[in-house]
């Protein structure tokens, strides 16, 4: 009997088994969704922001290093370096290799390189970086020794690259002018902080370059992407300074300051013909290689930043103007009383005397305040002020040094008869040393003022000012005859029989000069505090001048004045400078203008 076929049991509801078409459809849907996500991402990468994503991808395998520019040298007039760049190195870390040993490695580097432990520790641990500066401008041997020691102790991830170091081979010579660099910034490199280094940084610094190359597994890929931007080295700055003369000037000045127990001093030596500054010395000074060891006040140029009352050196300008205006002659007779009663206070001389009879030459040779005021009474209103402006007082010389002061020449509204009395003999106005040296040099230069210069040729400061010998200007201030007469009067100042400064004489040479002693204004009280500025300014040979030298000493404690304190220093410096430049004596007879009548 035939078997009746069995009816299969009904399929559970919701089961997909036995439905291949449905499974395929669902699979295609899932694949399509995944492909859609990839497609959308591809559109985003290629369509909307391709450059940034490409850069991100490339950066994973690219490394960029700095190619440091070499800083330009600062040279003296003969090409000898005052500041130069010598061989040095930077130390660089790869945080991916230094992160695990960062505390121990940071301790080693702080000890060997003198860097800050915590700053280095942070750099050794920097996330996502393969290139971090640890130290910049380290002497090459010191950097190599530090990295070698790290490797000997089992630390990896440090490399050394070239990075020139700033050096000041002459130490303190012209340091107050040249300036110095601070601790190099790991990213920016040089940090100029003062002097010519700062004022001409854009010219000296140059521009760093860079090298960009592809790496893999921490190593450079020989056939990978690479690009190099060459560094542009800085330009040299040649000054007018004579390094050997500057050295000698600073030693004479230091001895003068120490012997007199003074607070400080400065000297300016100028070529009469060109206005070039051959030496600008300050004391106290500092070693530019170790600026942090000196007080801040000793790291500036007092010769340019200090303002002070010039005292009796100012009488040279007063007399020059009077002679030019035709108001007097060197033989003009002046009766000088023991005291001169004026509007607000009596005027006296530095020496006690009864009524004396002096010529105008004698007034200058004896440095009589009273006689100078009586002579200055011959000026018309505003006339003396006009001459002093012509000599360059009341404005900066503009030689290119930051921090130069302009001095103070009272305005017309403040120029009273009382003010003129004091200004005539060097009080109630202020100057800086380079400014005053240039004014006296006008007498030496036949009445023509020549701008002082510190830079040879032409250079541009960071502020855009063009300075240097190529930009020197001249202008006539007084006549040639008036300048010659003034110089002959100044010769009597160093005459042992007539003047107050025989110690400023230079054997074999005719010397024209003038002493100065002025009361100082105290910073705290704003009044005369009992201390003094003493000085001597002069030029030689008097009848054919080659150099003008100005020596200033602040607050000597030995009781000396301009003749006894700064006069001998002037004589040493003038004698050395004349011999160094081979200037022979003129062989003519010195001035014999009468000092009394």
Image: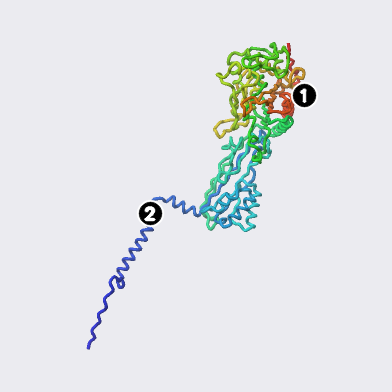
Callout 1 crowding tier (Cα within 10 Å): few <14, some 14–19, many ≥20: few
Q: Is residue 104 left or right of residue 225?
A: right
Query: Quadrant location of the N terminus?
Result: bottom left
- Tag in front: 2 or 1: 1
Q: Residue at x 62, y 38 (%)?
A: 180
Furthest residue to the front?
Answer: 525
What is the secondary structure assignment of the residue under circle 2?
A: helix
Q: Is residue 332 left or right of residue 136?
A: right
The residue that label 1 is drawn on is: 507
Furthest residue to the left?
Answer: 1
> Residue 318: x and y, percent?
64, 18
The residue closer to the viewer here, 45 or 416, is 416
The residue that label 2 is drawn on is: 43
Callout 2 crowding tier (Cα within 10 Å): few <14, some 14–19, many ≥20: few
137 versus 435 height, above or below: below
> Residue 308: x and y, percent?
64, 26
Q: Residue at x 74, y 15 (%)?
A: 592
Residue 273 quadrant:
top right
């Amino acid at each position: 009997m035939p078997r009746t076929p069995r009816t299969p049991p009904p399929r559970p509801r919701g089961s997909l088994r036995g439905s291949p078409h449905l499974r395929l459809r669902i699979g295609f849907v899932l694949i399509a969704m995944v492909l859609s996500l990839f497609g959308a991402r591809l559109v985003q990468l290629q369509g909307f922001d391709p450059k940034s994503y490409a850069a991100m991808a490339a950066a994973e395998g690219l490394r960029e290093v700095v190619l440091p520019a070499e800083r330009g040298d600062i040279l003296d007039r003969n090409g000898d370096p005052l500041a130069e760049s010598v061989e040095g190195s930077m130390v660089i870390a790869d945080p991916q290799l230094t992160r695990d040993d960062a505390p121990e490695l940071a301790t080693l580097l702080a000890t060997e390189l003198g860097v800050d432990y915590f700053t280095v520790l942070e750099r050794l641990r920097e996330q996502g970086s393969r290139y971090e500066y640890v130290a910049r401008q380290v002497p090459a041997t010191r950097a190599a020794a530090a990295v070698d020691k790290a490797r000997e102790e089992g630390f990896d991830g440090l490399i050394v690259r070239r990075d020139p170091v700033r050096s000041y081979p002459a130490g303190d010579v012209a340091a107050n002018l040249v300036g110095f660099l601070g601790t190099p910034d790991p990213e920016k490199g040089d940090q100029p902080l003062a002097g010519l280094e700062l004022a001409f940084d854009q010219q000296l610094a140059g521009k760093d370059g860079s090298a960009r190359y592809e790496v893999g597994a921490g190593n450079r890929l020989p056939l990978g992407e690479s690009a190099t931007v060459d560094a542009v080295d800085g330009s040299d700055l040649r000054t007018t300074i004579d390094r050997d003369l500057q050295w000698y000037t600073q030693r004479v000045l230091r001895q003068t300051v120490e012997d007199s127990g003074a607070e400080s001093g400065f000297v300016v030596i100028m070529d009469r013909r060109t206005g070039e500054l051959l030496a600008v010395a300050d004391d106290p000074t500092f070693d530019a290689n170790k600026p942090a060891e000196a007080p801040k006040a000793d790291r500036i140029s007092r010769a340019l930043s200090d303002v002070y009352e010039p005292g009796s050196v100012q009488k040279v300008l007063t007399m020059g103007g009077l002679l030019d205006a035709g108001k007097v002659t060197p033989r003009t007779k002046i009766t000088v009383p023991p005291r001169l009663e004026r509007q607000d206070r009596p005027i006296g001389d530095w020496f006690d005397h009864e009524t004396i009879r002096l010529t105008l030459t004698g007034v200058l040779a004896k440095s009589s305040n009273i006689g100078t005021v009586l002579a200055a009474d011959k000026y018309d209103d505003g006339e003396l002020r006009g001459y002093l402006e012509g000599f360059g007082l009341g404005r900066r010389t503009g030689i290119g040094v930051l921090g130069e002061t302009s001095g103070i020449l009272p305005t017309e509204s403040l120029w009273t008869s009382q003010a003129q009395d004091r200004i005539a003999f060097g009080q109630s106005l202020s100057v800086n040393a380079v400014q005053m040296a240039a004014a006296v040099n006008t007498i030496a230069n036949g009445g023509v003022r020549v701008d002082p210069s510190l830079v040879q040729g032409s250079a541009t400061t960071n502020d855009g000012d063009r300075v240097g010998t190529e930009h020197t200007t001249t202008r006539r201030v007084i006549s040639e005859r008036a300048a010659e007469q003034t110089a002959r009067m100044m010769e009597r100042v160093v005459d042992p029989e007539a003047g107050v400064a025989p110690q400023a004489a230079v054997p074999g040479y005719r010397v024209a000069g003038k002493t100065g002693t002025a009361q100082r204004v105290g910073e705290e009280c704003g009044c005369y505090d009992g201390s003094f500025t003493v000085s001597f300014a002069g030029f030689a040979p008097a009848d054919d001048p080659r150099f003008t030298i100005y020596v200033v000493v602040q607050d000597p404690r030995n009781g000396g004045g301009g003749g006894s304190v700064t006069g001998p220093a002037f004589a040493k410096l003038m004698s050395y400078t004349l011999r160094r430049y081979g200037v022979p004596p003129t062989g003519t007879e010195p001035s014999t203008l009468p000092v009394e009548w």
